[in-house]
Amino acid sequence: MKNVFQRIIDEELPCDKVFENERIIAFKDIAPAAPVHILIVPKKHFPNISAIGPEDGELILEVVMVANELAKKFKITDGYRLLTNNGEKAGQTVFHLHFHLLGGTHLGPIA
Ligand code: AMP
């Protein structure tokens, strides 16, 4: 069965989209943990960051560039966090690689 992010990518489920190109989609998290909480999702399927190899370097750089642009757009350049949970023990619940962009407040400790 398709994961929820694959269904969003395939336009089977709605999302509050803030960015899209051929390789990446970004949308607001449905349960925000900060005033700005955006998910940046490569369209190509990887279960998580541990599946990334050297051939994916350009894609990961593009994720960072999109995050930096969205940080400007959502006016959080004074402090933001870009993170990915890798595996259930790290809190990963959707097994399609995604990066959380968080900001808009003082962020607490990471763990
Ligand atoms: P993680 O726990 O790192 O796998 O992150 C999954 C994130 O996806 C959580 O922060 C959820 O709130 C978020 N999420 C789950 N379903 C949706 C959805 N349909 N639209 C937007 N965000 C979602």
Image: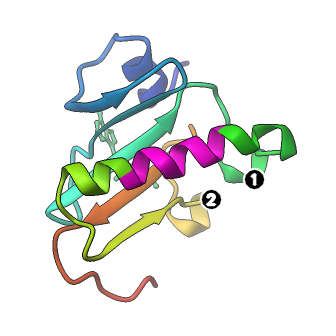
The quarter of the picture where the N terminus appears is: top right
Residue 47 location, quadrant: top right
**Residue drawn at the location 43% of the way across and 11% of the way down:** 10
Amino acid type at circle 2 is: Asn
Answer above or below: position of 109 versus 35: below
Neighbours of disc 1 within 10 Å: few (<14), some (14-19), many (20+): few
Q: Look at the numbered disc 1 and give the secondary structure of its residue.
A: helix
In the image, 13 versus 18, the foreground residue is 18
Answer above or below: position of 60 versus 75: above
Asked whether the viewer can see residue 19, the reply is: yes
- Which span of residues is magenta-colored? 59-68
Quarter containing ligand 1? top left
Residue labelled with disc 1: 50
**Residue drawn at the location 63% of the way across and 46% of the way down:** 60
Asked whether the viewer can see residue 47, the reply is: no
Q: Which mark is residue 17?
A: none
Q: Position of residue 5 (x, y in %)?
A: 44, 29
In the image, 94 versus 82, the foreground residue is 82
Amino acid type at circle 1 is: Ser
Residue labelled with disc 2: 86
Neighbours of disc 2 within 10 Å: few (<14), some (14-19), many (20+): some
Q: Position of residue 30 (x, y in %)?
A: 22, 44
**Contact? badges 2 and 1 (CB < 8 Å):** yes
Taking the image as shown, residue 56 lies to the left or right of residue 27, namely right
Residue positioned most to the right: 54
